[in-house]
């Protein structure tokens, strides 16, 4: 019984073992190889066997290079110093680093950067910071002698716009209108005749006078007239102070001097040597005020005076001028004048200026009225010529002409 049972079981176990042995090689041929086996097999290749398995790959070390860190400037205000700051890497490799800029005139200039704390500083002076602007680059020279531009370049510099204020823009526009001529030199002369002017009351005749005996009371009659020669210079800043001038001249003539109490023709001769500085202020485009001082040496001594004028309109075109001028006090009084003048621009090169003047100059006993007209012609190249003509009188019964000429050269 026992033998019959064990035998079939043994045969069965032998059959199963034989079957497994047959199937095992086929299954390992069909399965993928483990990753460890593949790597181990590849590592044994002769081409890679000589190289270290984990050797790192390193990039070549580059030498240190100087570098500039800079925030570019794009605008600035006119007539103010312009500051530039940079940070510099490896300054030990740098012989020189500087700001190279092109000024508004077109000239190239350079300023070295100097250490200021942790940064380096360069400053463009205020006189080079002008509209419309400038341009710059940053250049560096290594200790090896090699030069290079580290920011922008001279061929393509970085632009900086310079902003101008209203007064700068107004000055520039006015100067362009005047042909960039700030200075004006003038020279001229005038001859005025008031006619035979008679006094208001009789006075004693002086000694050796023709037509009367000494002590005889007569009404004086004088050929009232004068001539004047004047030169001047004007400079035009064209800002709040628009102009300042200096005039000087000589006046000679004769008139009924109010202080003369005896009829002597010699005493009716009058004269004046004068100088007059003046300043013109701008309050608005159409409002200017001119203030002047007068000093003189007359036939009776030294005297002082002054004057003022209000200009309404275009100061170098059509305008109305209202003014006065006086010189001397008491016995040294030479006279005063009050005037209005209307300049009319009649063409590109022509200006007509009618004028009304009330004056007792020179040393006259009473005021007279002058009606004058100036015609100014722009000759060109800054030269202009003015011709004056008119009529004046101190009495309704007498009067005479006025003639004058003036030349002005602007430069």
Image: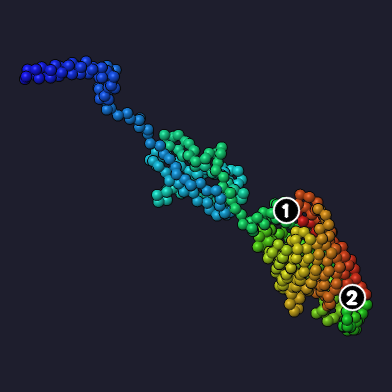
Q: Quadrant of residue 63?
A: top left
The local crowd at label 1, few if under 14, some if 14 to 19, many if 20 or more residues have their Cα within 10 Å, is few
In front here: 263 or 69? 69
Coordinates of residue 247 in the picture (x, y in percent): 73, 63
Q: In the rendered view, would you say 381 is above or below 282?
A: above
- Image point 75% across, 65% down: which residue? 312
The local crowd at label 2, few if under 14, some if 14 to 19, many if 20 or more residues have their Cα within 10 Å, is some
Q: Is residue 65 left or right of residue 322?
A: left
Q: Is residue 200 left or right of residue 113?
A: right
Coordinates of residue 100 in the picture (x, y in percent): 52, 43
Look at the image and tell me whether residue 126 can be seen.
no
Coordinates of residue 401 in the picture (x, y in percent): 89, 66
Say which label, 2 or 1, has the lower sequence index: 1
**Label 2, label 1: how far apart the Cα atoms are:** 45 Å
Tag 1's secondary structure? helix
- Image point 12% across, 19% down: which residue? 9
The quadrant of the image that shows the N terminus is: top left
- Image point 44% across, 42% down: which residue? 68
- Image point 42% across, 43% down: which residue? 88
Which labelled disc corresponds to residue 221? none
Coordinates of residue 372 in the picture (x, y in percent): 85, 65
Look at the image and tell me whether residue 370 can be seen.
yes
Q: Nearer the viewer, mark 2 or mark 1?
A: 1
Determine which residue is flagged by label 1.
177
Determine which residue is flagged by label 2.
395
The coloring applied to the image is rainbow
């Amino acid at each position: 019984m026992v033998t019959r049972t064990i035998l079939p079981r043994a045969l069965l176990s032998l059959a199963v073992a034989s079957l497994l042995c047959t199937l095992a090689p086929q299954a390992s041929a069909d399965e993928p190889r483990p990753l460890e086996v593949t790597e181990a097999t590849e590592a044994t290749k002769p081409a890679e066997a000589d190289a270290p398995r984990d050797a790192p790959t390193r990039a070549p070390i580059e030498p240190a290079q100087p570098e500039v860190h800079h925030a570019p400037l794009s605008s600035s205000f006119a007539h103010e110093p312009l500051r530039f700051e940079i940070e510099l890497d490896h300054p030990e490799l740098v012989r020189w680093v500087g700001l190279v800029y092109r000024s508004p005139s077109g000239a190239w200039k350079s300023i070295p950067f100097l250490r200021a704390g942790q940064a380096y500083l360069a400053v463009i002076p205020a006189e080079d910071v002008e509209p419309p602007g400038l341009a710059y680059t940053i250049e560096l020279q290594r200790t090896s002698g090699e030069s290079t531009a580290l920011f922008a370049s001279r061929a393509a510099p970085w632009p900086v716009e310079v902003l101008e204020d209203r007064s700068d823009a107004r000055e520039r526009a006015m100067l362009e209108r005047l042909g960039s001529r700030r200075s004006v030199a003038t020279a001229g002369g005038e001859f005025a005749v008031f006619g035979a002017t008679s006094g208001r009351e009789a006075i004693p005749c002086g000694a050796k006078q023709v037509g009367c005996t000494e002590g005889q009371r007569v009404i004086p009659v004088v050929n009232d007239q004068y001539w004047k020669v004047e030169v001047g210079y004007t400079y035009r800043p064209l800002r709040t102070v628009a102009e300042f001038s200096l005039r000087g001249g000589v006046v000679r003539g004769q008139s009924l001097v109010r202080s003369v109490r005896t009829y002597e023709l010699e005493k009716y001769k009058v004269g004046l040597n004068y100088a007059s500085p003046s300043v013109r202020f701008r309050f608005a485009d159409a409002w200017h005020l001119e203030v002047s001082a007068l000093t003189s040496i007359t036939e009776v001594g030294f005297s002082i005076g002054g004057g003022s004028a209000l200009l309404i309109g275009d100061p170098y075109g059509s305008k109305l001028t209202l003014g006065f001028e006086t010189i001397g006090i008491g016995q040294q009084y030479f006279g005063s004048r009050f005037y209005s003048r209307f300049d009319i621009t009649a063409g590109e090169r022509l200006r007509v200026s009618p004028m009304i003047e009330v004056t007792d100059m020179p040393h006259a006993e009473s005021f007279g009225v002058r009606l004058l007209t100036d015609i100014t012609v722009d000759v060109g190249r800054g030269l202009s010529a003015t011709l004056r003509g008119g009529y004046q009188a101190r009495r309704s019964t007498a009067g005479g002409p006025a003639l004058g000429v003036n030349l002005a050269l602007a430069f």
